[in-house]
Image (tube, rainbow, N blue to C red):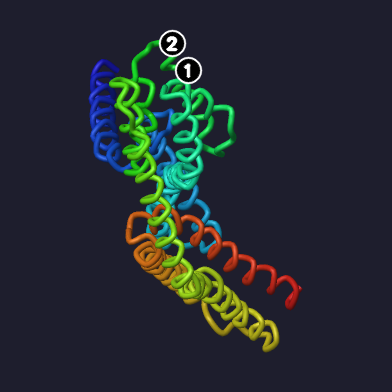
C-alpha cells in the first residue's frame, strides 16, 4: 500500500505535465478572436472533447463493426475531429462577427464623419453614433464608450475592437483613438478610409460572385454526392444478399469496405475544404475553420441517411 501511493502520485504528475504541455502547444491554435475565454480554456476543452470523442468513437465502431482493429483506427480520428469541432465552431462564429463589423464600417464612418463635422468633438460624435443600429458593431461600440466614460483610458476602451484581427477595424479605431487623445481633425482621413473599405468590399464581392459557382460545385460533390453514392452503393450489397438469400461478403469484408469509404470521404472533404478556403478567402486556414466542420457534418449525415434509411425502406 505504501509503495502504491507514490507510484500513483508519480503517474498523476506525469499526466499533469503531459496535459500542460499539450495545453501550451494547442493554445496558439485555439484562440477565439474577440472571445471572452482565453486560449488556455479552449485548449483544455479541446483535449477533453478529444478524449471523449476517442472513447465514444472506439465504442461505437466496436459495436457497429465488431472489430477491435477498426475501432482502434477510428477512435483517434473521431477524437481528433471532436476536439477540432469544439474550437472551430466558435472560431467560425467569431470570424463571421468580425466580417459583419467590417461590413458595417462604411455606414458607421459616414455617420461619424457627418456628426464630427458639425460638433468637432470625437467623443460626442461617438456617443451620437451609439444610438444608431450598426448590427454587430453597436454592442462593441457601446461597451467601448462605457469603458471610456468610466476610465477615460482610450487604449483600454478600444482595446477589444483594435484586436479583432481585422486591419480595417484596427486602423479605424486607431485613428479614432488618436483623435480623442490629440483633438486633431481626422474628417478627411475617415473619408479616405471609408472609400478604401468600400472599394475592397466591392472587389471581394466581385471575386466571390465569379468563384461562387465553382465553390458550391466542389462543396456539393464532396459533401453531398459522394456520400450519397457511397451510402447507396453499400446498401446495394445488402439488397443483393437479401434477394439472393446468401452472404456475398463476410463481416470483415463489409467492415473493410465501410472503413475504406469513410476514410476516403474524410480525406476528400478535407482536401475540398482547403481548396474552397484558398479560392474564396485566399487562406487555407479559413477553409479549414469555416468550411471543414460543416462539410464533414453534412457528408456524415448524408452517408448515414442514404445507408440506413434506404435499407429500412427497401429491405424492411
Q: Which residue is mark 1?
A: 146
Residue 292: image x %, image y %?
A: 44, 58
Q: In the rendered image, which quarter is residue 248 located in?
A: bottom right
Q: Secondary structure at mark 2?
A: helix
In the image, is 254 to the left or to the right of 311? Answer: left
Question: Label 1 crowding class (10 Å Cα cut-off): few <14, some 14-19, many 20+?
Answer: some
Q: Residue at 40% of width from left, 62% of height from top?
A: 203
Q: Residue at 35% of width from left, 39% of height from top?
A: 188
Residue 177: image x %, image y %?
A: 33, 26
Question: Label 2 crowding class (10 Å Cα cut-off): few <14, some 14-19, many 20+?
Answer: few
Residue 270: image x %, image y %?
A: 39, 64
Is any atom of residue 209 visible in this view? Answer: yes
Q: Which mark is residue 150?
A: 2
Q: Is 55 placed above or below 69 here?
A: above
Question: Pointers 1 and 2 in contact (CB under 8 A)?
Answer: yes
Q: Which mark is residue 178?
A: none
Q: Residue at 43% of width from left, 44% of height from top?
A: 91
The front one of 108 and 289 is: 108
Q: Residue furthest top?
A: 150
Q: Quadrant of the C terminus?
A: bottom right
Amino acid at each position: 500500500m505504501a509503495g502504491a501511493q507514490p507510484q500513483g502520485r508519480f503517474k498523476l504528475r506525469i499526466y499533469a505535465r503531459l496535459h500542460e504541455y499539450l495545453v501550451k502547444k494547442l493554445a496558439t491554435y485555439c484562440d477565439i478572436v474577440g472571445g471572452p475565454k482565453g486560449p488556455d480554456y479552449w485548449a483544455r476543452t479541446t483535449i477533453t472533447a478529444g478524449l471523449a470523442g476517442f472513447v465514444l468513437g472506439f465504442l461505437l465502431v466496436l459495436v457497429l463493426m465488431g472489430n477491435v482493429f477498426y475501432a482502434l483506427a477510428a477512435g483517434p480520428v473521431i477524437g481528433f475531429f471532436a476536439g477540432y469541432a469544439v474550437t472551430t465552431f466558435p472560431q467560425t462564429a467569431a470570424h463571421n462577427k468580425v466580417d459583419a463589423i467590417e461590413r458595417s464600417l462604411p455606414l458607421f464612418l459616414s455617420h461619424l464623419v457627418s456628426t464630427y463635422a458639425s460638433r468637432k468633438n470625437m467623443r460626442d460624435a461617438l456617443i451620437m453614433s451609439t444610438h444608431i443600429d450598426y448590427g454587430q458593431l453597436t454592442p462593441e461600440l457601446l461597451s467601448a464608450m462605457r469603458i471610456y466614460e468610466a476610465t477615460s483610458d482610450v487604449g483600454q476602451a478600444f482595446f477589444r475592437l483594435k484586436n479583432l484581427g481585422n486591419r480595417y477595424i484596427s486602423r479605424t479605431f486607431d485613428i479614432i483613438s488618436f483623435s480623442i487623445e490629440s483633438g486633431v481633425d481626422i474628417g478627411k482621413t475617415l473619408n479616405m478610409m471609408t472609400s478604401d473599405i468600400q472599394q475592397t468590399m466591392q472587389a471581394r464581392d466581385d471575386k466571390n460572385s465569379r468563384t461562387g459557382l465553382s465553390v458550391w460545385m466542389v462543396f456539393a460533390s464532396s459533401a453531398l454526392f459522394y456520400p450519397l453514392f457511397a451510402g447507396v452503393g453499400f446498401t446495394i450489397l445488402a439488397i443483393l444478399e437479401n434477394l439472393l438469400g446468401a452472404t456475398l461478403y463476410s463481416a470483415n469484408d463489409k467492415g473493410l469496405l465501410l472503413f475504406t469509404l469513410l476514410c476516403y470521404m474524410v480525406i476528400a472533404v478535407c482536401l475540398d475544404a482547403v481548396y474552397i478556403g484558398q479560392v474564396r478567402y485566399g487562406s487555407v486556414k479559413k477553409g479549414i475553420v469555416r468550411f471543414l466542420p460543416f462539410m464533414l457534418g453534412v457528408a456524415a449525415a448524408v452517408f448515414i441517411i442514404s445507408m440506413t434509411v434506404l435499407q429500412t425502406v427497401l429491405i424492411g
